[in-house]
Amino acid sequence: MSRPSAVGLAAGTEPLPDFPQLRQCPYQPPPGYRDLREAEGPVVRARLYDGRPTWVVLGHAVARELLIDPRLSSDWSRPDFPSPSPRRKAIQKATILVGMDPPEHSAYRRKLISAFSVRRTRELSESIHRRAGELVDTMLEQGPPAEILSGLALPLSSHTICGILGVPYEDHGYFEEQSALLVSPQVTEDDATGALMNLRTYLTGLVERKEKESEPGDGLLDTLVHRDLAEGSLSRDDVIRLGIILLMAGHETTASMITLSTFTLLQNPRQLAAFRADPAGAGLAVEELLRYLSIGDVAMRIAAEDITVGDVAIRAGDSVMLSTAEINRDAEVFDDADDLDLARGARNHFAFGYGVHQCIGQNLARAEMESALTLLFSRIPGLRLAVPAEQVEIKPAQSGVQGIYELPVAW
Ligand code: HEM
């Protein structure tokens, strides 16, 4: 395993490793994280893209402790709030909720929660399953070959979040393109800001149109406009910024998980055979894929006060980054943590985060993954990669959502 590259050498100081680092395999955490954890323990020092030092949390027990510690802040409006990349910095400026602390955060979250409840997701699961089936049927009619992201994962996740929010699905090409620009490795901070401005302009137009409607639709944005904006508990800017984060988080992450899960199962034939043989175990399988792949690999925080964890003294103002991917491979919590074991039943992973910011769309994501993967692998028994696995391009570490750009398949 290679050591992480040393950067920022200053006279008399130890060089610090980069954070984040690039995955060498789409479904494995960067090997440098394991080296660091083994050499230095569950909390290590590293350096961000802008040269700033950061703590990096790599162990499950420490992460559990820190993620519910109110002294660790998610407040992106703090001028020195850290970021793993220039692109993430731009996103941090344009969204709300995930970048806030209680009690402000709780007030916003309360307004959204019922649209993503277990009950609501259960009501939606039939239409999610139907839509996934239609997409797989279209793949069968038109292929082989086919491409999983554009043929199944993205249309399913975009269609679902559009329905929940009340965003017209015919606009999906536009918002998918702008969101993709944000995670593209070629994009500068200016380009990312431009893409976000476009998303903002799009959401502004949509919110203004909804304000003029005398018969509100039944999407979450309609409720926010006609209930919260109308009664003054949310501003127009709040609704727009909530719309941006929900639309982006709602399609990008789940699409990435479905695509990467497909690749990972195709690369693990024994697990794939077990998946096909036990449709009732699909829920457990999805949970294990979430743990194993951990695509939301960086949680960003800043210490609002001094915090001591174990023998590490984190000072107020210090950057703290958590690598969910490495945390979810902690051997003290998960037996044979580096093995993909679809029957494992591990629910105590942090693929959806932990604490007050735990993913609001997790029930939805699980339902979409379960439908997409079961239908794909049951209706296309001969599914295989259409290119050598080494040619599948890995997203950069800094993108925020790990995964692959596309997955050509045949059968
Ligand atoms: C497999 C797919 C998904 C993964 C892996 C994922 C992962 C995560 C993670 C790790 C967090 C916590 C971030 C932190 O602590 O800083 C989070 C928060 C969030 N996620 Fe997801 N997510 C997924 C799907 C979705 C979907 C479908 C939505 C739909 C709207 C969504 C909306 C959000 C929102 C709004 C937050 C912020 C919650 C808050 O701050 O209170 N996510 N997600």
Image (cartoon, rainbow, N blue to C red):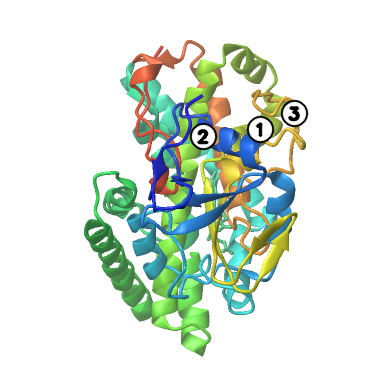
- What residue would you read off at disc 1? 288
Mark 3 or mark 2: which comes first in sequence? 2
Residue 240, by quadrant, is bottom left
Residue 276, by quadrant, is top right
Amino acid type of the residue that numbered disc 1 sits on in the rendered structure: Glu
Front residue of 237/216: it is 237
Name the side, left or right, on which 190 lies relative to 110. left
Q: CA distance from mark 3 to mark 1?
A: 7 Å
- Residue placed furthest toward the bottom: 232
Q: Tell me the residue at 22%/61% (across/down).
A: 190
Mark 1 or mark 2: which comes first in sequence? 2
Mark 3 residue CB less than 8 A from any atom of ligand 1: no
Front residue of 79/395: it is 79
Query: Is disc 1 in contact with disc 2, using a CB cutoff of under 8 Å?
Result: no
262 in relation to 402, above or below = above
At which x and y percent is residue 287?
Answer: 66, 36
Front residue of 310/343: it is 310
Q: Residue 65 shows which numbered tag?
A: none
Amino acid type of the residue that numbered disc 3 sits on in the rendered structure: Arg
Mark 1 surroundings: few (<14), some (14-19) or many (≥20) residues within 10 A: many
> Which of label 3 and label 2 is nearer to you?
2
Mark 2 surroundings: few (<14), some (14-19) or many (≥20) residues within 10 A: many
- What residue would you read off at disc 3? 344
> Which of label 1 and label 2 is nearer to you?
2
Q: Tell me the residue at 59%/17% (across/down).
A: 272
Q: Secondary structure at mark 2?
A: helix
Amino acid type of the residue that numbered disc 2 sits on in the rendered structure: Gly
Query: Is disc 3 in contact with disc 1, using a CB cutoff of under 8 Å?
Result: yes
Q: Secondary structure at mark 1?
A: helix
Q: Secondary structure at mark 3?
A: loop
Q: Tell me the residue at 33%/57% (across/down).
A: 86
- What residue would you read off at disc 2? 32
